[in-house]
Image: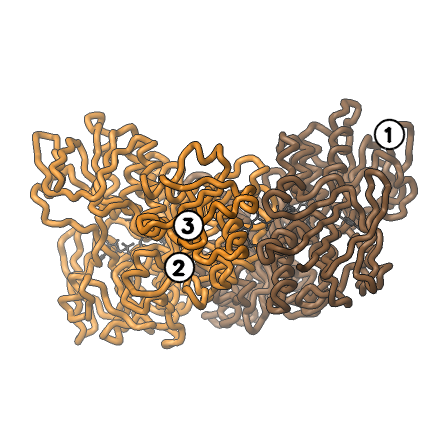
Chain colours: A orange, B brown
C-alpha cells in the first residue's frame, strides 16, 4: 500500500490528493495544510471583501470532513510541514493547534505550498493596517478593517490583477481608493496600449492611479498611514493592501536540499519530479520550461495548478507517462465593467525573449452591430513574422473578451497560426458574434501581412516614422477627422482616395490611419496598386493611437 | 483588365466582390442582385420582426452607393441573372425595374445565389398568410402582418433555428405561437437529449409544440387558416411561417449545364471551381466534401459563406493556391433565455456516417459557483473511441455556451482530441470560468474512458441495460434520491459506498448514476478497484436521464 504525503491543501495539493485517490483506492493519502482551511477559493477572496460573494461558507469548495467521506483523503489542517528528512523519507510536522510535533513517513511526497505575497523591506511596512491577501484568514482581517466605518481610504500597492480586483472591491464598498504601481502601466500581462484603456476606465470609476512611482516609506501617524512615494507624493490612508507579487513559499524545501530556482521556485522536470525522485511538486511554487520561450517560467494561476495536479498524480501512480507541456499563462480579470485577458506572450515578453514578432490590432464589436448590446473590444495578436505562428493575444472590452482569448489560447495550444485564426469557425448568430469574428479579423490582418498585401505598423513605429518625416494620411471622414487626429496628417476619406491620388507623395513613406485599421487597409491596397510602395497601415488605427498617446 | 461578374449580392457575393477589389484594384467588378437590397443582415431579420432590432436601416450592412465609393464595386439591384451563356462567357440579365434585358460578358463568373425556403406541395400552401423568410422584403411582409392587431396567432412550421427564432420573436410580440415539427425533436443540429431541454424551455415560455407531426393541409376559412396535422390535430391561426429548410437557388445554373448535386447544390472543387473552369461558386448554394465525414455537404451558414468568399477571390486572382477545407458547421441560436450551439458532428450524424464514437456529457456551471450569476449548462462531446479525436460538441444553457462551443470548434479545426480539451487553458477568474472549465471536464471524462478508468454509457444505453436486468445504483444523497430517481435503483450515497460494498452484486452489470456524472465516476472508481468489473457510469447523470425520458 503506497503512502502519499502532500504539503499544501488548496489547488495543487487537494487536486493531487483527489486524483491520487481515484487512481489508487487503497493508498494512504495524507494532506498537510498549515492554515485553518483546505480547498478554498483564493480567487474569490477579493469579491468576498466587496460583498459580491455574500456567504463566507461558499469560499470553501471542500472541507476535511467532506474530503474524508468523498475521497477518503485525510486532510490535517493547522499542520505545518517544517522539514523534510529525505534519507528517512519522512516529513516533520508541527501541529499549530497544540504545538506538538511529529514525523510522518512517505513513499512519495508532493509539494504544493504555493506562493506568498512579497513584502519588501520598506520602512514602516510592519504596520498592522498594511495587509496582504492570500488566505481566508487574510480576507477576514481585511474585511474586518473595511467593515469598520473609520476606514475611509485605501491604498493598493501593485497594479497586477489581484491589486486591481481589490481596488475595485474597495471602491465598491465606498472607500477612496488609490493604486500605486512602480511600472508605467497596470496589468503587466498586457501591453501598454491596452493597459492604457484599463487605466482610463479605472480613473473614470474614481480610482486614483499613481504610475511609475514606487513606495519609499509607510509613515504611521496614529491610526493613519502616510504612504510616501519615490516622487515625493504623500497619500494618507487608513488601509494599505500590499499586492506587488508573490514568491514561492519554499523555505522548508530549500533546507532539505530540494533544488530551487533563483526566485525560490522548485525546479521540476516534465513529470513534476524534483531533484529527489521521491518528491514531486506542482502549482505556484514550481518552475518549468515555457513552451513558447523555452526559458524558465513560474506561473501563479489556478488553472495550471489544477491541471498539473491531475497529471502529477498520473505520473506518480502509473509511472512517468504524461509529460507536462507547460503553460501559456492564459489569464483574465474583471475590473469594474471591463474584462482584461491575455494568453501567451506579450510584446514586452517577446522583446525580452528576443523572439521575432509582428502585431495585429483591431477594435471590433463583441457581436453584430445591428443587434442590441454589441460593445467594442480591443484585440491584439502577436505572431511570428514569417511562419505566422501565434505567440500571444490580449484583449480589453466589456463583453465577449473571455471567449476570444479562450479561442486563441486553444489555438496557441495547438501551435496555431494566423491562418488558423482566419479559418476559425465561430458559432455565429447576431447576439453572439459577427459573420467575421474579431478573431477572424486579426487572423486576416496577419495573413495579409504575410502575403505582402499589407504592411502594418504599431503606434510606436508610426510615431517614429512621423518623427522621421513620413507623410501622414488619415482616410477617415472629414467629420471624424475634425474630432481628433494625428497632428500634421492630411485627411482624404478613403472613398475619395481614388480621385485624389495626386495629393499623396510617391517618394515619401506614407503612414495611413483610419479609426481602427480597416479603411486604412482599403486605402493601402488602393495606393499599393497605384504604384505607391512605401505604405504602412497603422494597426488599431486612431483609436489605438489616441489611447496610447494620452 | 479582368472582368468579374457576380450573381447574388449578399454574404457570398458581396464578400467575394470586396476581396476581389482588394486584390485587384483595376478589375471590372459587377454584382447582380435580383432583390432590392444588397449586403443585408439575413441573420438579423427575425429580431427585426420582434422589434429587438428597431431601426430597419441597421439591416443594411452595405448599400450599392457605399459599395461603389468604398470598393469601386458596381452593384446592380433588381437585376436577375436569368441565364448563362458559357460559350460566349456572358450572362443574360433581366432588369426587374423596367423589364429590359441585356447580356454582360465575364472573364470569371462567381455564383452566390444562396438558397430559398422550401415550399412543399401541401394543399392550401399558396395562401398569402403563409409566409417564409429569406429577404428584407419577406420580413417587411411578415412584420406588416404582425403589426396588424387582427393577427393574434401564428404557427411556425419547422423547428430549425430560423423557425425557433421566429417563434420567439412572434411570442415576444404577444402572439399565441405554435411550432409544428415532423421530427421527434426541434433543432436537428443537436441530439435528442439536449433538444429536450430546449423544448422544455419553449413550453415554459408558453409556446405550443407539436412534435413528430407533419402538416397535411392548410385550410382557408376567410382570413383564418386551419393547419391540419397528420395526427388529425387542427390548429387555427392567422399567420403561418414556413421554415422547413432551404434549397439551393440554382435553376439558372442547372439550365447552363453547371453540375449540380441531387439537392440542387452546385458541385465545386476545393477552389470553388464548378465543372466550368471560368465559373466559381460559394455560399449556401454549393456542395463540397465534409472534412469530418468525407461525404458531400451543403451548409447554409453566414460564417462559412463569408470565409468561402474570401478564399474564392484569392484563388481567382492568384491562381488556385488556397484550398478550402470545408466547414464543420459550427452554429448557434438564442431561443428566449437559452443558447443552443453545436459544432462538428452529432450522434445522429455519426450514426448516419457509420463512424465510431463515444460521448461525454456534463452539466457544469458557466463560471465558479461561488461567484454570482453562474448558470448550469449541458455540454456534450462526441469523440473517437480509440484515438480520442473530437467529432463534435453541442451545448445548451444560459451563459457561456457560445464560448465553449467556439473553443471546441477551434480545436476540431486543428484535429484536436479529448486530451486537447483536457489540457486547454481557459482564461480563469471566478466571473468567467472555473479552475477546471466545462471543456476540461468533458476532456477528462473522455480521457478516463480511453484510459480504461471509466466506462461511460448514454441514457439510451442505460435504459437498455436496465431493461436487460442490470443493477441500478444511485449514489446521490438520500435527499436528492427522494426527489426523483431511476425506477428500481438502489440508493447508496457515494460517501457511504466504501462501507456498503456488500450490497452491490458482483455478478451483475452495475449501472451507476449520480446527478451529473461526477460522483457516479467516483463511485465507479471505488467499485472497480474493489473487484467490480461490469460497472458503467451514466454520462450526464440523472439530469440527462430525466430530461430525455420526459
Ligand atoms: C486573492 C487571490 C486571487 C486569485 N485569483 C486568481 C484568479 O482569478 N485566477 C487564477 O487562475 N488564479 C488566481 N489566483 C491564484 C491561485 O489561487 C493560485 O494559483 C493557486 O491557488 C495555486 O495553488 P497552489 O496549490 O500552488 O497554492 P495555494 O493555493 O497557495 O496553496 C498552498 C497551500 O499550502 C499551504 N502551505 C504552504 N507551506 C506549507 C507547509 N510548509 N506546510 C503545510 N502547508 C503549507 C499554504 O498555507 C496554502 O494554503 C489568486 C490568488 C489569490 C491569492
Ligand atoms: C432568417 C435567416 C436567419 C439566418 N440566421 C443565420 C445565423 O444566425 N447564422 C448564420 O450563420 N446564418 C444564418 N442565416 C444564413 C445566412 O444568411 C446565409 O448562410 C448566407 O446569407 C448565405 O450567403 P449566400 O451569399 O450564399 O446567399 P444569400 O445571402 O441568400 O444571398 C444570395 C442572393 O442572391 C440573390 N440571387 C439568387 N439568384 C439570383 C439570380 N439568378 N440573379 C441575381 N440574384 C440572385 C438572392 O436574391 C439573394 O439576395 C440566416 C438566414 C436567414 C434567411
Ligand atoms: C459588407 C460586405 C460587403 C463586406 O465585405 P468585406 O469588406 O470583405 O468585409 P468587412 O467589412 O468585414 O472587412 C473585412 C476586411 O477588412 C480587413 N480588416 C478588418 N479589420 C481590420 C483592421 N482593424 N485593420 C486592417 N484590416 C482590417 C480584413 O482583413 C478584411 O479584409 P481581407 O478580406 O482583404 O483580409 C459583406 O461582408 C456583406 O455583404 N455582409 C453582409 C451580408 C452578410 O454577411 N449576411 C449574412 C450574415 S447576417
Ligand atoms: C475541490 C478539489 C479537492 C476537487 O478536486 P477534484 O475532485 O479533482 O476536482 P473536481 O471536483 O473538479 O472533479 C473533477 C473530476 O471529476 C470528473 N468529472 C467531472 N464532471 C464529471 C462528469 N459529469 N462525469 C464524470 N466525471 C466527471 C473529472 O473527470 C475529474 O476527475 P479526474 O481528474 O479523475 O478525471 C480541488 O479542486 C480543490 O481543492 N479546489 C479548490 C481550490 C482551488 O482550486 N483554488 C483555486 C481556484 S479558486
Instruction: Indicate the chain on which mark 1 is placed.
Output: B
Label 1's element? strand
Label 2's element? strand
Q: Between marks 2 and 1, how big is the CA–CA gap?
A: 64 Å
In the rendered image, residue A333, in percent from the top left (x then y), is placed at: 36, 46
At horizontal 72% and vertical 53% (from top left) the residue drawn is B6
Q: Give the residue number, with chain letter if any, for mark 1.
A: B224
| Left or right relative to A505: residue B84 | right
Residues under numbered marks 3 and 2 in contact, where contact means CB atoms less than 8 Å apart = no
Task: Tell me whether marks 3 and 2 sit on the same chain.
Answer: yes
Q: Between marks 3 and 2, how big is the CA–CA gap?
A: 17 Å
Nearer to us in this view, A519 or A402: A519
Q: Give the residue number, with chain letter if any, for mark 2.
A: A358
At horizontal 15% and vertical 31% (from top left) the residue drawn is A236
| Left or right relative to A169: residue B63 | right
Instruction: Indicate the chain on which mark 2 is placed.
Output: A
Quadrant placement of the C terminus of chain A: top left
Disc 2 vs disc 1: which is toward the camera?
Answer: 2
Q: Give the residue number, with chain letter if any, for mark 3.
A: A511
In the rendered image, residue B317, in percent from the top left (x then y), is placed at: 63, 63
Nearer to us in this view, A541 or A196: A541
Amino acid at each position: 500500500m503506497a503512502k502519499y504525503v502532500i504539503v499544501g491543501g488548496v489547488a495543487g495539493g487537494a487536486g493531487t490528493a483527489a486524483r491520487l485517490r481515484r487512481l489508487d483506492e487503497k493508498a494512504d493519502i495524507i494532506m498537510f495544510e498549515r492554515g485553518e482551511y483546505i480547498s478554498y477559493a483564493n480567487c474569490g477572496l477579493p469579491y468576498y471583501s466587496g460583498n459580491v460573494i455574500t456567504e463566507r461558507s461558499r469560499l470553501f469548495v471542500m472541507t476535511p470532513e467532506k474530503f474524508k467521506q468523498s475521497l477518503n483523503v485525510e486532510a490535517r489542517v493547522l499542520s505545518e510541514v517544517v522539514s523534510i528528512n529525505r534519507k528517512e523519507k519522512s516529513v516533520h510536522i508541527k501541529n499549530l493547534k497544540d504545538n506538538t510535533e511529529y514525523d510522518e513517513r512517505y513513499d512519495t511526497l508532493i509539494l504544493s505550498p504555493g506562493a506568498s505575497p512579497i513584502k519588501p523591506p520598506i520602512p514602516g511596512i510592519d504596520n498592522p493596517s498594511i495587509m496582504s491577501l492570500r488566505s481566508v484568514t487574510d480576507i477576514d482581517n481585511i474585511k474586518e478593517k473595511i467593515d469598520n466605518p473609520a476606514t475611509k481610504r485605501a491604498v493598493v500597492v501593485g497594479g497586477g490583477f489581484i491589486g486591481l480586483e481589490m481596488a475595485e472591491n474597495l471602491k465598491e464598498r465606498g472607500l477612496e481608493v488609490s493604486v500605486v504601481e512602480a511600472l508605467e502601466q497596470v496589468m503587466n500581462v498586457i501591453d501598454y496600449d491596452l493597459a492604457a484603456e484599463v487605466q482610463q476606465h479605472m480613473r473614470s470609476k474614481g480610482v486614483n492611479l499613481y504610475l511609475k512611482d514606487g513606495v519609499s516609506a509607510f509613515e504611521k501617524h496614529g491610526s493613519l498611514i502616510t504612504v510616501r512615494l519615490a516622487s515625493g507624493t504623500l497619500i494618507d490612508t487608513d488601509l494599505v493592501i500590499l499586492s506587488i507579487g508573490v514568491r514561492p513559499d519554499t523555505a522548508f524545501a530549500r533546507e532539505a536540499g530540494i533544488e530551487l530556482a533563483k526566485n525560490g521556485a522548485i525546479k521540476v522536470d516534465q513529470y513534476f519530479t524534483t531533484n529527489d525522485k521521491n518528491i514531486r511538486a506542482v502549482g505556484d511554487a514550481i518552475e518549468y520550461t515555457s513552451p513558447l520561450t523555452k526559458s524558465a517560467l513560474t506561473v501563479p494561476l489556478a488553472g495550471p495548478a489544477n491541471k498539473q495536479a491531475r497529471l502529477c498524480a498520473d505520473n506518480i501512480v502509473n509511472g512517468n507517462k504524461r509529460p507536462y507541456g507547460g503553460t501559456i499563462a492564459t489569464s483574465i480579470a474583471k475590473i469594474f465593467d471591463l474584462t482584461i485577458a491575455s494568453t501567451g506572450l506579450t510584446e514586452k515578453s517577446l522583446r525580452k525573449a528576443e523572439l521575432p514578432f509582428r502585431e495585429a490590432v483591431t477594435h471590433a464589436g463583441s457581436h453584430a452591430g445591428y443587434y442590441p448590446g454589441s460593445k467594442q473590444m480591443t484585440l491584439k495578436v502577436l505572431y511570428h513574422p514569417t511562419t505566422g505562428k501565434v505567440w500571444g493575444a490580449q484583449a480589453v472590452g466589456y463583453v465577449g473578451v473571455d471567449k476570444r482569448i479562450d479561442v486563441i489560447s486553444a489555438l496557441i495550444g495547438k501551435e496555431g497560426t494566423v491562418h488558423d485564426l482566419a479559418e476559425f469557425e465561430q458559432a455565429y448568430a447576431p447576439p453572439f458574434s459577427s459573420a467575421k469574428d474579431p478573431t477572424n479579423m486579426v487572423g486576416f490582418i496577419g495573413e495579409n501581412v504575410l502575403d505582402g498585401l499589407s504592411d502594418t505598423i504599431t503606434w510606436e513605429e508610426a510615431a517614429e516614422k512621423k518623427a522621421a518625416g513620413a507623410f501622414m494620411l488619415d482616410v477617415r471622414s472629414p467629420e471624424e477627422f475634425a474630432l481628433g487626429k494625428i497632428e500634421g496628417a492630411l485627411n482624404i476619406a478613403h472613398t475619395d482616395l481614388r480621385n485624389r491620388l495626386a495629393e499623396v507623395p510617391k517618394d515619401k513613406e506614407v503612414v495611413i490611419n483610419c479609426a481602427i485599421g480597416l479603411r486604412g487597409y482599403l486605402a493601402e491596397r488602393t495606393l499599393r496598386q497605384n504604384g505607391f510602395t512605401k505604405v504602412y497601415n497603422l494597426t488599431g488605427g486612431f483609436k489605438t493611437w489616441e489611447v496610447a498617446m494620452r
